Image (cartoon, grey):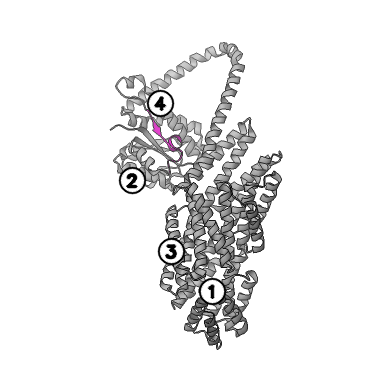
């Protein structure tokens, strides 16, 4: 059988493993068989495969890996104590075993012992101990390890070429001895040559500097491609971000070396900062919030130094970096720190003299963060500034920014019950995103359409247009489930959890509690995976809210024990992260705690006290007001209860029917109040 590759190197992307792999790879590809061996008809090694050499993204492209393994003669597994945790390496070994080439697997042992350093599948290979290439050295001295590798690699060279290993070792030793003799003879001529060599030193140095400059430029072009084009192009590929993060981490090492040696340090430092920002984004998508913040802080530190030169470009980059930092804080639920970062971003952007699209994006992000923190006044002020600056969008970037502004505007108006205005803003957002999608069909643009459709479906549901809402949610869920196949992409998982919960809400409002129970369970499962992955306050709060919805729905199904247990689970999750939450999440927590006290503990005074606190935090929130109305009712403050609940019912959209169903379920559970018939009569008048 002919092979496209003579050897496939399987290894971890750790500093020592990478360095040894690179050197062993080069040694193998450059090795020339002794003439006496070639004269017997054996051919030199032609080509080896390793991912950073052949394709930077090969870990993502499963078919490429499979094809390379199937067309490889031998598999070299670089084994260290870091190796066993790599599922990729174990998978590559498994494939080589499955295609019947287990006897062509060669472990290159660099640290640890076979028990510590072999992946699980490698330990099952018969006679593997006979093919171990042991180059371990005290202190992991790479130079000494490679000196040992010169002899140890003869095992795999013999396996690749098919020649006798003993013959190869004998000829190798003769070749070494000949080199030593040549060096000894040559040393006598060195002194005589020094004078002649020195005459050419200046010319050589000049040529070297020119060559080094060209190499630096070429390296920076490659690294720039990996920093910008690769992550952007691969963001649509499921499972890509873990590989992107690995590439960007390697980039940071390479760029830092270039920065130290570069004659154009400013350009190299800009590349370094940009790479750290991309690394922050990749880690954030993967749910590694602390690593993302660390990378973003490093980028800001570099930009701060560059901004001291006073250039507008440096200030603009620094403004963008502060805005990105704000987004990371926001997604981690650290809203005050996010607000401070956005404030720095706005100041720096204005100082740069550019008050165009970049400033709009910062205002938009600051407004969205203000919403999360419950600061509606600041949020609307930021959004109004954006709309003023984007009166007529001219580019796809401006179209994107305008869509985001209208989306957030609509969501907040919907929360306050201002449905006609909310619907208008959300329809505008959908139009912006659909136009954007027509220019470029990307996963990110599809997700924007989904978010806007979901928010509009929320409005349709709240206004009683349930059939329209169901259809819109179903469309959005189908699209989101496609995106969520990328299980490592946390934003898509969060979006899917919210959609399941929203669809459940439509069923709930129509009294179909069995269907809503199933959808709420889906939401809890998806949100739980996200919270376990990231551990952030915001994601734990999301899980808690899904659990509360499930608990309340279970109460409607009269499964009181399950309802009570699920409420307790939700509150426990909330309480873990309460200190890191904004007023909106705090209000939701306190409000539902009030409801729990009503329906399960019958602690009516405690429920009223908690409801008043929730109202203080979010006086315009419909859920908060509804629960406050129930608390007033069961504490015999009927006038206050009637005012709040009838005002909510007057909004329309099924609110009166929802309040009626709540009261019916409360009575079924044993809650009593003499004013309930009077309240139901008042609701009937509004129906």
* Magenta residues, start to end: 46-59
Residue 375 shows up from this direction = no
Residue 666 lies in the magenta-colored region:
no
Q: Which of marks 2 and 3 is nearer the N terminus?
A: 2
Query: According to the image, label 4 marks what residue?
Result: 31
Mark nearer the N terminus (4 vs 1):
4
Secondary structure of the residue carrying tag 4 is: loop
Horizontally, residue 556 falls left or right of residue 92, namely: right
Question: What separation in Å lies between label 4 and label 1 (alpha carbons)?
Answer: 81 Å
Q: Marks 2 and 4, Cα distance to the nearest angstrom?
A: 30 Å
Label 3, secondary structure: give it.
Answer: helix
Q: Please tell me in which quadrant of the rendered image residue 554 appears.
A: bottom left
Q: Which of 177 and 671 is in front in this view?
A: 671
Q: Do the residues labelled 2 and 4 touch (CB within 8 Å)?
A: no
550 vs 226: above or below: below
Image coords of residue 502 (percent x, y): 48, 65
Which numbered disc covers residue 471? 3
Please name the residue that numbered disc 1 is placed on: 652
Q: In this view, does 169 lie above or below 123?
A: above
User: Is the C-beta separation of discs 2 and 1 under 8 Å?
Assistant: no
As drawn, which residue projects farthest toward the front? 392
Reading the image, the residue beneath label 2 is 124
């Amino acid at each position: 059988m002919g092979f496209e590759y003579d050897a496939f190197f399987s290894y971890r992307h750790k500093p020592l493993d990478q360095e040894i792999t690179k050197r062993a790879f080069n040694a193998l590809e450059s090795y020339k068989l002794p003439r006496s061996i070639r004269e017997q008809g054996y051919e030199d090694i032609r080509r080896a495969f390793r991912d950073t050499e052949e394709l930077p993204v090969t870990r993502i492209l499963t078919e490429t890996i499979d094809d390379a393994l199937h067309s490889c003669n031998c598999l070299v597994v670089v084994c260290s104590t870091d190796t066993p945790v790599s599922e990729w390496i174990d998978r590559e070994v498994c494939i080589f075993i499955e295609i019947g080439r287990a006897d062509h697997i060669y472990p290159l042992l660099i640290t640890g012992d076979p028990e510590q350093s072999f992946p699980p599948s490698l330990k099952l290979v018969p006679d593997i101990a006979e093919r171990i290439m042991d180059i371990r050295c005290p202190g992991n001295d790479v130079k000494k390890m490679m000196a040992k590798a010169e002899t140890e690699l003869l095992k795999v060279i013999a396996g690749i070429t098919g020649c006798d290993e003993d013959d190869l070792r004998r000829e190798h030793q003769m070749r070494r001895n000949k080199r030593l003799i040549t060096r000894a003879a040559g040393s006598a001529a060195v002194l005589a040559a020094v004078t002649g060599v020195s005459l050419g030193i200046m010319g050589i140095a000049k040529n070297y500097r020119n060559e080094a400059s060209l190499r630096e430029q070429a390296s920076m072009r490659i690294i720039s491609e990996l920093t910008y084009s690769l992550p952007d192009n691969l963001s649509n590929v499921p499972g890509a971000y873990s590989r992107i993060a690995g590439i960007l981490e390697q980039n940071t090492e390479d760029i830092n070396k270039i920065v130290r040696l570069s004659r154009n340090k400013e350009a190299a430092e800009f590349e370094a900062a940009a790479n750290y920002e991309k690394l922050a984004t990749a880690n954030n998508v993967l749910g590694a919030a602390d690593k993302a913040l660390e990378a973003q802080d490093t980028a800001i530190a570099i930009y701060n130094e560059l901004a001291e030169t006073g250039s507008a470009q440096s200030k603009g980059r620094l403004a963008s970096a502060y805005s990105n930092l704000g987004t990371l804080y926001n997604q981690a639920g650290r809203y005050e720190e996010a607000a401070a970062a956005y404030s720095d971003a706005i100041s720096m952007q204005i100082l740069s003299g550019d008050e165009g699209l970049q400033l709009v994006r910062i205002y938009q992000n600051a407004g969205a963060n203000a919403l999360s923190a419950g600061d509606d006044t600041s949020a609307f002020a930021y959004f109004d500034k954006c709309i003023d600056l984007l009166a007529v969008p001219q580019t796809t970037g401006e179209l994107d920014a305008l869509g985001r502004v209208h989306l957030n505007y609509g969501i907040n108006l919907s929360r306050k019950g201002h449905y006609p205005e909310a619907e208008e803003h959300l329809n505008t957002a959908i139009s912006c995103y659909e136009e954007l999608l027509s220019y470029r069909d990307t996963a990110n643009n599809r997700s924007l359409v989904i978010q806007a459709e979901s928010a509009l479906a929320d409005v349709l549901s709240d206004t009683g247009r349930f059939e329209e809402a169901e259809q819109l949610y179903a469309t959005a869920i189908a699209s989101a489930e496609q995106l969520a196949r990328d299980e490592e992409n946390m934003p898509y998982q969060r979006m899917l959890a919210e959609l399941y919960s929203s669809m459940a809400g439509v069923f709930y409002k129509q009294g179909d509690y069995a269907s809503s129970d199933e959808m709420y369970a889906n939401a809890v499962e998806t949100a739980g995976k996200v919270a376990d992955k990231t551990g952030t306050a915001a994601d734990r709060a999301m899980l808690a809210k899904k659990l509360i919805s499930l608990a309340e729905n279970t109460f409607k199904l009269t499964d009181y024990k399950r309802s009570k247990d699920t409420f307790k689970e939700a509150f426990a999750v909330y309480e873990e992260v309460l200190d890191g939450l904004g007023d909106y999440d705090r209000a939701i927590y306190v409000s539902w705690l009030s409801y729990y006290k009503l329906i399960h503990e019958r602690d009516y005074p405690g429920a009223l006290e908690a409801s008043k606190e929730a109202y203080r935090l979010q006086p315009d929130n419909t859920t908060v007001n509804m629960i406050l109305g129930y608390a007033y009712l069961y504490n015999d403050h009927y006038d206050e209860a009637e005012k709040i609940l009838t005002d909510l019912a007057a909004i329309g959209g099924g609110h009166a029917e929802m309040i009626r169903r709540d009261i019916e379920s409360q009575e079924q559970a044993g809650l009593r109040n003499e004013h309930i018939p009077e309240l139901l009569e008042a609701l009937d008048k509004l129906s």
